[in-house]
Image (spheres, rainbow, N blue to C red):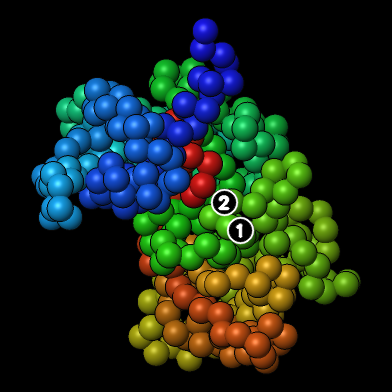
Amino acid sequence: MITADQILVKQINKAIALNTIYKKKPISRAEIAKVTGLNKSTVSALVDELLAEELIMETGTGESQGGRKPVHLSINKEVGNIIGIDLGVNYILSVLTNFAGEIIWERRISVKKNGNSSLQRIDDLFQLIEEAIKNAPPSVRGVIGIGIGVPGIVNYEQGHILSAPNLCWTDVKLKEIVETRFQVPVFIDNEANAGAIGEKWFGSGKKATDLLYVSAGTGIGAGIVINNEVYRGSQGLAGEIGHMTVELNGMTCSCGNHGCWEEYASEKALFRYMQKHTSVESLSVFDLIDLATNGDDAAQEGFKYVGKYLGIGVANLINAFNPEIVIIGNTLPLVGDILMDELRKEVELRCFASKYYSVKILSSELNMHACAMGAAALVISRLYASPVV
């Protein structure tokens, strides 16, 4: 009799095999066994099941090492489509990918930060998902899942938004709401965790075992990857570094605390600086990026000011976590070296760890797509792959 434990072990091994093919495609059965430590007969049986389920496909043969030529295996990217959502504060970005994570369609819409109720924002989200479904090409399984990154405190397992201060959301059961509407599996995570997963699967962090992804936009959050897994803390709330105190009696934050880092190193701080030093009003962060990259002195000084404060916090994170790489994502690093040079300079001054090793600090390779692509990867990792990111 096959026990429940044996079934679980098989499911885990199957997920490990699929994840290995996903990351190292094309790869042979023998190479999967070597990489995973699973024995060859187990791998062969698992691969046969994955082929029968059309999740993978045979894609030719490799060079013989004295016996039969090895058969290469790759992901069947046409097996189904995935929707990834970055539910931003002043925008919503939706991407539609195939099973290999290649973007087929995308759309971003602007939303008013304080003018949209939670119901209106959810309605906007529904419309984008419906558009993505309409644009999905024919596939074996259709749309297999929806992943959503949200800027706030998220119960990852339940898909429950506990608090998203910048959205003015509290206690929103988003997974339940979206699954009820579209009848497909939905997976939800904090947007910085999603960004970290996106960079680990598809961007600058592919080869890193330990990395930090700092999302610097309307607020600040961190996705922390330790030993190839997202670190979530005992209750899944790790990464809320935007709310660490940097000024004892500082400005009031949307979370209710005073002196939070994001009040000094986010878009909020940039806008506050521009209002104080110029007469320019009603510009978006993208307008300010254009001004700065085209040589506007005030805009450049604003980004340098924010970059300095970003560097202070990043130095603290490097001292705490000792990562291989730090990736700065979301809107602010889109301005390029104007901000990043100031950030790196401040890290060099303040980072104790940098005396002993050099940590790479990079702008996001995926730019504004990091969260949405990470949200798409959530679907793959939760439905089919192993716990590692």
Q: Residue 45 lies in what quarter of the image?
A: top left
Identify the residue at the far right of this view: 249
Identify the residue at the far front of this view: 66
Q: Residue 367 lies in what quarter of the image?
A: bottom left
Q: Residue at x 51, y 12 (%)?
A: 2
Residue 347 pos. (x, y %): 63, 85
Residue 324 pos. (x, y %): 55, 72
Residue 213 pos. (x, y %): 55, 63
Q: Is residue 63 visible?
A: yes
Q: Which residue is denoted by mark 1 in the rendering? A: 226
Q: Residue at x 72, y 85 (%)?
A: 352
Q: Is residue 385 visible?
A: no
* Amino acid on which disc 1 is placed: Ile
Residue 200 pos. (x, y %): 45, 57
User: Dot 2: what SS?
Assistant: strand
**Mark 1 and mark 2: span between their CA atoms?**
5 Å
Q: Residue at x 20, y 28 (%)?
A: 139
Q: Which residue is denoted by mark 2 in the rendering? A: 229
Q: Marks 2 and 1: in contact by CB < 8 Å? A: yes
Q: Residue 318 lies in what quarter of the image?
A: bottom right
Where 54 falls versus 191 (above or below)?
above
User: Dot 1: what SS?
Assistant: strand
- Left or right of 241 on screen, residue 323: left
Q: Residue at x 27, y 27 (%)?
A: 48
Where 288 falls versus 278 (above or below)?
above
Closer to the camera, 120 or 38?
A: 38
* Amino acid on which disc 2 is placed: Glu
How many residues crowd mark 1 within 10 Å: few (<14), some (14–19), many (20+)? many
